[in-house]
Image (spheres, rainbow, N blue to C red):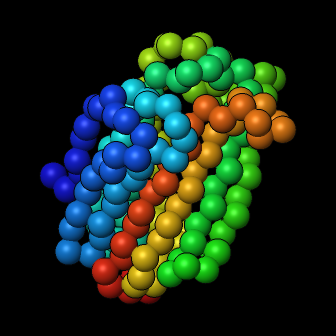
Amino acid sequence: MFGFLFFVLITPGASEFLCTSSDLDLSYTFCDSTPHIFMFNVTPCTMANKPIWKTAVTWIPRNDITFLKTIFNVWYDGAKALHWRQVLCSGADDVYSICGALKGETIEATFDIKGSRISFPKGNYSIILEGFSDDSEKDMVMCLNITMRVKQDTF
């Protein structure tokens, strides 16, 4: 299996390896100052045939998740390629299983990422994923610095 499953309590700055294959390397570090209990799994570990990546996350948040705003920034070979903001939980009609989770409660979520929507040219990608428990973006609950190296064009 190409995916690498792990469950860790790590210190900030320690790099965690997700997966490697002939066409893809994935790893991440936390970019905030507090250790997390966090598990992340991605399969298959490939860019071939524009896959649907199956992902699973297990996480114990430091705050209640009644409101959750995510900010997703992607840089490709040093140039900003994408900036995306999304409110996932607002306390009303939330559709995601993570919404309503309490501080210290284990969250387990699975979701698909559809690679067929995006073409990834060969190169190095730096992805910052931030989660905030307020709309003003002052109360950070998670920050990941994901490094993705695409080893061959996927057009």
Query: Is any atom of residue 115 visible in this view?
Result: yes
Residue placed at 58% from the left, 66% from the top? 74
Please tell me which residue lies in front, 62 or 25.
62
Residue 45 versus residue 116 in the image, above or below: above
Residue 46 versus residue 34 in the image, above or below: below
Where residue 2 appears, as percent x and y from the top left, is 19, 56
Residue placed at 27% from the left, 52% from the top? 17
The reply, left or right, for residue 80 in relation to residue 126 is right
The reply, left or right, for residue 101 in relation to residue 2 is right
Residue 23 versus residue 6 in the image, above or below: below
Residue closest to the far right? 136
Residue 9 versus residue 25 in the image, above or below: above
Residue placed at 43% from the left, 76% from the top? 124
Residue placed at 64% from the left, 75% from the top? 80
Q: Quadrant of residue 100?
A: top right
Query: Is any atom of residue 42 visible in this view?
Result: no
Where residue 73 appears, as percent x and y from the top left, is 63, 61
Where residue 46 appears, as percent x and y from the top left, is 29, 67
**Numbered circles on residues, count:** 0
Q: Quadrant of residue 89?
A: top right
Q: Quadrant of the C terminus?
A: bottom left
The reply, left or right, for residue 82 in relation to residue 153 is right
